[in-house]
Image (cartoon, rainbow, N blue to C red):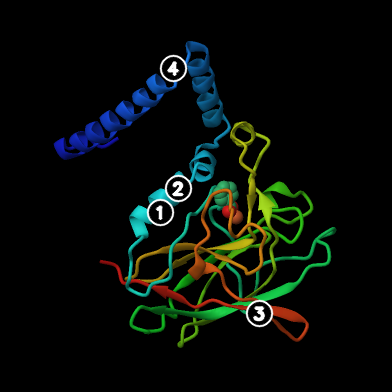
Amino acid sequence: MEAMSPADTDRVAGVVNDALAAIHEVLERHRVTEREWHAALAFLTEVGRADEFILLSDVTRTSVLIDAMEHGGDDSGATASDVEGPLYVDDPPWREAPVKVYEDYEGMGDADVLFVRGSVTSIDGTPLPDAVIDIWQTGPSGGYDIWDERQPEFNFRGRWRVEDEGGAYEFQTMLPKPYTVPTEGPVGRYLEAVGQHPWRPAHIHFKVTAPAHRPLITQVFFPDDPYLENDTIGAVKAALVRPVEPEGDHLVCPFDIVLRPAA
Ligand code: BEZ
Ligand code: FE
């Protein structure tokens, strides 16, 4: 590990001391007992063992708060960012044009084919043909590929370079459905204990990068979803709810992506 500078030490001490003061104040105010405190420590130990700290950050809406502080208040016209969540898998496959991000699987159900299309541009409208779009989402049944043995590895995941000189992109997927965040581990027990439901509205995650631009991580949501108003991680933003229209035998969702130049 690199040695910390005096400024780093000051920063850490400042944040940690304030965090401890806030925690101590809450413990005192609620007269938390030794037994309760030990249960809390055992819970956090389990969260670490189960690799669920990102999930805990998400369901406590801490991830949304950090995302808002880091990327909020951006009036440049760039697409709004959103939290990444814990379900991105490194090194997804490169997909060839015409991009289709899934293979059919047994039990996928009666689902709607969806084409998502739009452009990737800079805030001044310059097209970004060298942008790379990387998406991940649940299948129409069974959730993410990593939870569902029926789906091939990396189903409903993939990345590709835009290539088009005008920045236009399109990919074929299936309309995802609402799903619950993982509930079989300690975070599931936490949700039950605090009376919070585990549902997220249907969404598609995007990571978009382009030379000389700030990377964007975001999500797209769809109208009329029962969980738009009460996403368990609180990540829905009105600007990221995109229309879905029928077109022939499939659906279409327009989503233009605007990146901000790197500082
Ligand atoms: C997700 O959307 O993939 C997700 C986000 C937060 C917690 C769990 C899952
Ligand atoms: Fe997700």
Q: Assess whether mark 1 and mark 2 are in contact (beta carbons under 8 angstroms).
A: yes
Residue placed under numbered mark 1 in the picture = 67
User: Label 3 is placed on what type of residue?
Assistant: Val
Give the quarter of the image for residue 248.
Answer: bottom right
Residue 31's tag is 4
Q: Dot 3: few (<14), some (14–19), or many (≥20) neighbours within 10 Å? A: some
Residue placed under numbered mark 2 in the picture = 63
Q: Assess whether mark 4 and mark 2 are in contact (beta carbons under 8 angstroms).
A: no
- Name the residue rendered at 60%, 60% in the picture: 228
Report the number of numbered marks. 4
Label 3: element kind: strand
From the image, which quarter does the C terminus lie in? bottom left
Does label 3 or label 1 sit earlier along the sequence?
1
- Name the residue rendered at 20%, 34% in the picture: 9
Q: CA distance from mark 2 to mark 1?
A: 6 Å
Q: Is residue 132 left or right of residue 22?
A: right
Q: Is residue 167 left or right of residue 139?
A: left
Which residue is outermost to the left? 6
Residue placed under numbered mark 3 in the picture = 252
From the image, which quarter does the N terminus lie in? top left
In the picture shown, does residue 171 fall above or below 52? below
